[in-house]
Image (spheres, helix red, strand yellow):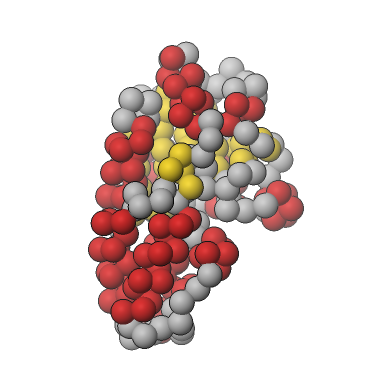
Amino acid sequence: MYKTYIFDLDGTLLNTLGDLAASTNYALRQFGMPEHSVDDVRRFVGNGVGKLIERAIPMGLDNPEYENVLATFRQHYMLHSLDTTEPYPGIQELLSTLHSEGCNVAVVSNKFYNATVELCRHFFADTVEVAIGERQDIRRKPAPDTVFEAMRHLGVTAEGAVYVGDSEVDVATARNSAIPCISVLWGFRDKDFLVEHGATTFVNTPEEILRIRN
């Protein structure tokens, strides 16, 4: 039976896509750059906001306005990250059940640190013990570093731990951390794409996670 559950955030616990797209397009508009559809932004996310903006702007990192667009995105998103974002159906019940069963619950995300912490505090203050986002002093996913830091904060080892996420980055993160991965199918990637990237265990609803007990 799994005793430690480490969750991705965007596309796994929270549907953040609308607010991410709105902040991306706001930042692009400020610099006269072409905007993107929500589906475009869906494909851009998963590797942190730096990579999101790199993918969204013309010329990527070579664009002289890259840092300014990124800073504008961060400022806008911190003010608007709750405009439309909400937990996926069944997530609150899942986390409450895990908490009541005495399981360890953490969030490890490539979303920048302040936003990760604030969103978890707002939505999951009673059920998520540790929330770790992207910051400069630790390698982001798919490196295992943030997973290991979460385990350290929880006071646990990899034994009995599982990673739950919606993307190819999460599959690779779990593999690099030497723990199993449960891939959710309500997030930002479809099943065929996840299979191509090595995913093997899938759930269609949060409730199904409770039935996978290794």
Tell whether 11 sits left or right of 180: left
Q: Quadrant of residue 179?
A: top right
Q: Quadrant of the C terminus?
A: top right
For image coordinates 45% across by 63% down, the residue present is 21
Residue 143 placement (x, y as % from top left): 47, 50
For image coordinates 57% across by 53% down, the residue present is 188
For image coordinates 46% across by 77% down, the residue present is 35
Q: Is residue 131 above or below residue 24?
A: above
The reply to whether residue 134 is in sight is no
25 or 138, nearer to the observer: 25
Q: How many numbered circles does the render carry?
A: 0
Q: Quadrant of residue 201?
A: top right
Residue 16 placement (x, y as % from top left): 45, 51
Q: Quadrant of residue 129?
A: top left
Tell whether 195 sits left or right of 94: right
Q: Quadrant of the N terminus?
A: top right
137 or 209, nearer to the observer: 209
For image coordinates 58% across by 31% down, the residue present is 206
35 or 161, nearer to the observer: 35
The residue furthest front is 84
Tell whether 185 sits left or right of 170: right
Residue 210 placement (x, y as % from top left): 59, 22
Residue 48 placement (x, y as % from top left): 42, 59
Q: Is residue 100 above or below residue 80?
A: above
The reply to whether residue 38 is in sight is yes
